[in-house]
Image (cartoon, rainbow, N blue to C red):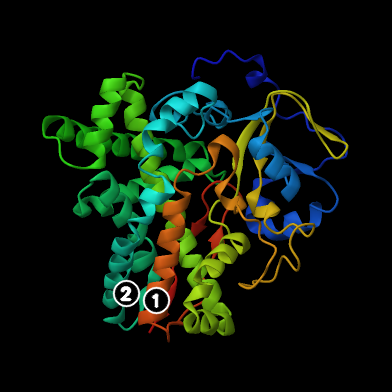
Amino acid sequence: MNGTDDPTRHADLSAIPDGVPTLTVAELEADPHGVFRTWRPRLPVVGHEVAGYLVLRARDVDLLMRDPRARATETLYPETRGIPEGTLFDIFAHGMLTANGTVHRRRRSPFTRTFAARMIEGLRPRIRAAAESLVRDVLAEDEVDLVERYTSLIPAQTIADILGLPRDDIPRFTRLAYEVSRVLSFTFGPEDIPDLEAAALALQDYVRAILEARRSSPQDDFLSRFLAEADAAGELTPQEVVVQLVQMIIGGTDTTRVAGAMQVALLLQHPEQWAAVSRDPGLIPAAVAESLRYEPSVGSAGRVAQEDIALDGHVVPAGSMILLSTLSALRDEAVYAHPDTFDIRRADLPRLHPIFGGGAHRCIGEALARIELEEGLGALMRLAPDLRLTGAMPAIQGHSGIRRIDALRVAA
């Protein structure tokens, strides 16, 4: 548990006070926007049958993203889901995303230079060329699933190039990453844990083999530099080195494929807005930002209360697990005008998009994700302006963690 001896970690997570409803996973999965729309005006928090508390309002979510009283969960989440050890557990125990304080900074620091906005901006021409090449492949077919053939490949190819992974390995590591990311949702049961554990082990073994190859034959790439610097600094354990890269692969593939598909689907569902972006490429960043608000690819961020936290007359007790619901906050009526309307010209989005979190844990891949989404959309606008849906709108599911999306059938 990252060496943290904190008695609040073992507090009773089910002690929801009177007057605060406890919502089931089933009802949250069935209609998260509807559930949040019902409860957000009434209460700042609701109970969650598995995860303690859901924080619903934008102001509170923003506050607690940065509040030291709400710390990253470390291993509390897998423990509460019946995963007390093993490879899945290790992703939480040894990764930067769930760590706190100096441990978090130590694990994150080797990546900050590589993922700095100025460095990442230099990748834009390469990402644009890759997106255009993929669009030309799509145009060669009568009908395709844009998720499988396009929006999943842009981030996968990019993260492969950044980390120096063979592109031929993309089907392998993306399949494993998508499977492992299910552990962040509440839609798996005890019977699914062996399969999730096997996927996590396979992904970790894949990363370990790649690292061994770099140690034997260093190249002029990120992985070789990362290993050399990590070995010289001596601050990361061998397990931490592997887990940071596992997390980078998961975060660098799954979230952006969902967001990339959803922004295309939403614009095609609103043809006047698709046409506006097609006429004016300057609208692309706004279209990306509004899509991330309207249907975010990440539904929540987990925290644990280090002390009692008062929110508008209600108290989240010390030791409680908390889900900061970006899904709810991004449709908060107190912040966004007509929040259930998709509008790429809205002027009320904050300068720092809430989907990327806040404070010390703000997403390290934010700049990269924005470029991938902008260039992915831009390539379609330039080369496939007459793209159309040939099936139903893709269903995006999930109220927490990385959300899931089914096929996006289109034709040009």
- In space, the residues marked 1 and 2 are separated at their CA atoms by 7 Å
Q: Is residue 190 left or right of residue 234?
A: right
Residue 366's place in the image compared with 66, above or below, is below
* Residue occupying the point 29% across, 38% down: 202
- Residues under numbered marks 1 and 2 in contact, where contact means CB atoms less than 8 Å apart: yes
Q: Which of 388 and 234 is in front in this view?
A: 234
Residue 235's place in the image compared with 242, above or below, is above
Q: Which mark is residue 135?
A: 2
* Residue occupying the point 49% across, 84% down: 279
Q: Which of 348 and 343 is in front in this view?
A: 348
Q: In this view, does 28 lie to the left or right of 268?
A: right
**Three-letter amino acid code at disc 1?**
Leu
Q: Which mark is residue 380?
A: 1
Kindly state the secondary structure of the residue where label 2 is placed: helix
Q: Nearer the viewer, residue 192 or 271?
A: 271
Kindly state the secondary structure of the residue where label 1 is placed: helix
Residue 361, picture quadrant: top right
Q: Nearer the viewer, residue 123 or 242?
A: 123
Q: Position of residue 2 (x, y in %)?
A: 49, 19
**Three-letter amino acid code at disc 2?**
Val
* Residue occupying the point 67% across, 56% down: 330
Reading the chain from its start, which is encountered first: label 1 or label 2?
Answer: 2
Residue 35, picture quadrant: bottom right
Does the rendering let one see residue 51? no
Q: Where is residue 334 in the image (x, y as percent from the top left)?
A: 80, 57
